[in-house]
Structure formats: structure tokens, C-alpha cells
Amino acid sequence: MPRTRVKLPKGYKPTQKEAYMNPKQQEYFRQKLLDWRDELIEESRETISHLQQEVRDVGDEAERATRETENSLELRTRDRYRKLINKIDKALTRLDEGEYGYCEETGEEIGLARLEARPIATLSLDAQERWELRQKQMGDLR
């Protein structure tokens, strides 16, 4: 069930003095996520437009190779954006479900500073460090 949205005061920033994930903080992060999502979608559109407008059979072999490398990089970037947009959508769903801002592993608060830096974070810093250590150990075993 979607939560009631609130109008944020101009220049609002979440603080530690407020109740964690109160309606203002939720709306702040909702807007941050939506703005980021819109920005990524617009950049993806520009990439697609650029690739569609580019003339393929121009120049010598070296120029064509350079273009193909640039196109490959643009497509990888676009794929990265697609994955980020998916994570943003999941964060927006967690907001609607009242789970945003809480660690998926421990249920603890992720924290305002971490969410400000990485609004799609799903793990607290401690849980993230444990996950990274497990990944490193699994890599060492292979």
C-alpha cells in the first residue's frame, strides 16, 4: 500500500535529530531516487540517439576500429545504467513497502549518511563489509 506523500520544505535535508525514515525523509529519498532515475533514462536516450545517428562506413580501418571501441563502451555504460535503474526501482518499491533505509540482512538502520552517498544501498555498512569479505574469500577458494 503506497504511503501518504508529503511536501518537502525548500532545501530540506534529513538530519539525525528527526525520527529515522519519517515521512519527510522518505519523500526526500523518493525524490532523490526519481531524479537519479530520470537522469539515467535521459542519458540512455542520448546514447541510443547518438548510436543511431552515427554513420558506420566512414573513414579507414583505424577510424572504424576506434568507433567500434567507443560504441562498445557506450553500450556497456548503457547496460550499467539499465542495472542501476533496476536497483532504483527496487529501492522505490522498498520505500512504498516501508522497508527502505533498513538493512535486508539485519533489519538495522542503514543510516542517513550511507543512504545519502548510495541511495540504493540495501545493507548496513557492517553487513556490506561482511558480504564483501565473503565474496573475497569465495574468490580465494576458486
Image (cartoon, rainbow, N blue to C red):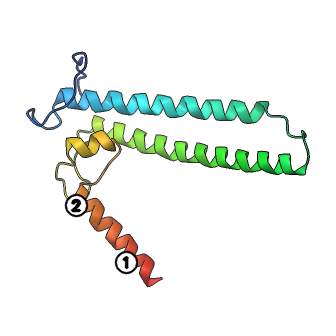
| Residue at 32% in and 66% down | 131
Mark 2 Cα-neighbour bin, 10 Å: few <14, some 14–19, many ≥20:
few
| Residue at 48% in and 28% down | 38
Viewer can see residue 2: no
Q: Locate residue 10: give its quadrant.
A: top left
Q: Nearer the viewer, residue 94 or 37?
A: 37
Task: Describe the element under mark 1 as helix, strand or loop.
Answer: helix
Q: Nearer the viewer, residue 59 or 79?
A: 59
Residue at the spot of label 1:
137
Please indicate whether residue 28 sits to the left or right of residue 16 in the image: right
- Label count reads 2
Viewer can see residue 13: yes
Residue at the spot of label 2:
126
The relative height of residue 56 versus residue 38 in the rendered view (above or below) is below
Please indicate whether residue 33 sits to the left or right of residue 109 in the image: right
Task: Specify the amino acid type for callout 1.
Answer: Gln
User: Residue 109: x and y, percent?
Assistant: 17, 48
- Real-space Cα distance between discs 2 and 1? 17 Å
The numbered mark, 2 or 1, whose residue comes first in the sequence reads: 2
Residue farthest bottom in this picture? 141
Please indicate whether residue 116 sits to the left or right of residue 47 in the image: left
